[in-house]
Amino acid sequence: MNRRAVLTSCAVVPAVAGCLDSLPFTGDAEPVAAPAAIVLGNRSDDAVDLQVVAKEDGTEVYNEVHTVERLQTAKETDHGYPAAGSVHLVGEWLGNFAEYTFEFTAPEHGLERSLDTETAISNGETAYSSVYEGGCYYVLAEIDHSGDTLSGDFREYDHDLAFSDEVRQHVSQCA
């Protein structure tokens, strides 16, 4: 092996290791974005019970089961397009600039999904990123068409999206 290559790689490792401490998800950084709402979606043909567990800074602040209605066909909706069943959750336990963990479970389907504040928000940045400073994200957990996959991610909150009035009224400190 080339001696110069070995010496160069040895010099780079400590420099990179030192830089890792400055990354937001490895140090003592605090989240600068907050969850505004949780949206539960169901694109399958059957209603689904989803358990939602939320922890703020390691303390459980929410633990409830919600029935999410089935996908409605275009013929069943007033607007002529299919519509996923959905439930929008808001509460005093949301909206804080804290570390969150969200766990979603569909027990009858054996499905689980977990997200935390290190999960990317839309474009790959996390709740620690200055891109979202003072802003909101919402949490989406959704059963797919086949009913055998539970996906979940964070999305940037936009007050103009089709959220319920209850969600819009609740969101204040981070919108």
Image (cartoon, grey):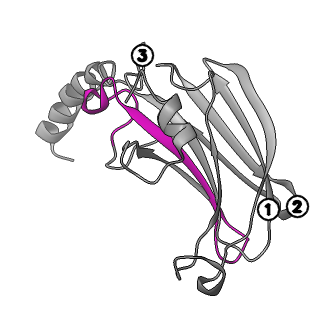
Task: Give me the disc on residue 114.
Answer: none
Amino acid carrying mark 1 in the image: Val
Q: Which residues are magenta?
A: 125-150
Residue at image location 64% in from the left, 37% down from the top: 102
**Mark 1 vs mark 3: in front:** 1
Q: Residue furthest left?
A: 4
Task: Give me the disc on residue 108.
Answer: 2
Q: Residues within 10 Å of mark 3 (few under 14, many from 20)?
A: some
Q: Which quadrant would residue 33 be assigned to in this image? A: top left
Residue at image location 88% in from the left, 61% down from the top: 108
Q: Residues within 10 Å of mark 2 (few under 14, many from 20)?
A: few
Q: Nearer the viewer, residue 48 or 151?
A: 48
On the rendered structure, is 145 left or right of 64? left
Q: Nearer the viewer, residue 145 or 94?
A: 94
Q: Are dots 2 and 3 in contact, CB under 8 Å? A: no
Q: Is residue 131 magenta?
A: yes
Question: Where is mark 1, residue-wise?
Answer: 48
